């Protein structure tokens, strides 16, 4: 499974909408959409923020 699919699955399993994930990770929702659309890849620090967003 590629990163975009894993990211989408992760926030759905946590019961978070894209906007909620973005708010909790400190990134703009447009970036979340870019990551899930495989248009952009997050930096390592953003990956950490996404992984710990609850």
Image (cartoon, rainbow, N blue to C red):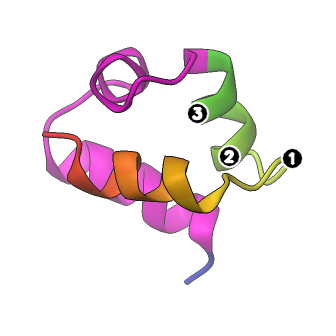
Q: Are marks 3 and 1 in contact (CB under 8 Å)?
A: no
| Residue marked by disc 1 | 39
Q: Are marks 1 and 2 in contact (CB under 8 Å)?
A: yes
| Residue marked by disc 3 | 32
Q: Are marks 2 and 3 in contact (CB under 8 Å)?
A: yes
| Residue marked by disc 2 | 35
Question: Is disc 2 placed on a helix, strand or loop?
Answer: helix
Secondary structure, magenta segment, majority class: helix
Crowding around mark 1 (Cα neighbors within 10 Å: few <14, some 14 to 19, many 20+) is few
Q: Nearer the viewer, residue 1 or 21?
A: 21
The span from disc 1 to disc 2 (Cα, nearest Å) is: 6 Å
Horizontal arrangement in the rendering, residue 16 relative to residue 19 (left or right): left
The span from disc 2 to disc 3 (Cα, nearest Å) is: 5 Å
Residue at (67, 19) in percent of width and height: 30
Horizontal arrangement in the rendering, residue 6 relative to residue 37 (left or right): left
Q: For the C terminus, which image quadrant?
A: top left
Question: Is disc 3 placed on a helix, strand or loop?
Answer: helix
Question: Seen from this angle, which residue lies furthest front?
Answer: 45
Question: Is disc 1 placed on a helix, strand or loop?
Answer: loop
Where 17 falls versus 50 (above or below)? above
Find residue 4 and report its horizontal and vertical position in percent.
61, 59
The magenta stretch is 3-29
């Amino acid at each position: 499974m590629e990163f975009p699919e894993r990211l989408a699955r992760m926030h759905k399993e946590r019961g978070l909408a894209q906007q909620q994930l973005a708010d909790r990770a400190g990134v703009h929702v447009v970036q979340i959409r870019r990551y899930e659309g495989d248009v952009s890849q997050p930096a390592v620090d953003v990956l950490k923020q996404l992984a710990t967003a609850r």
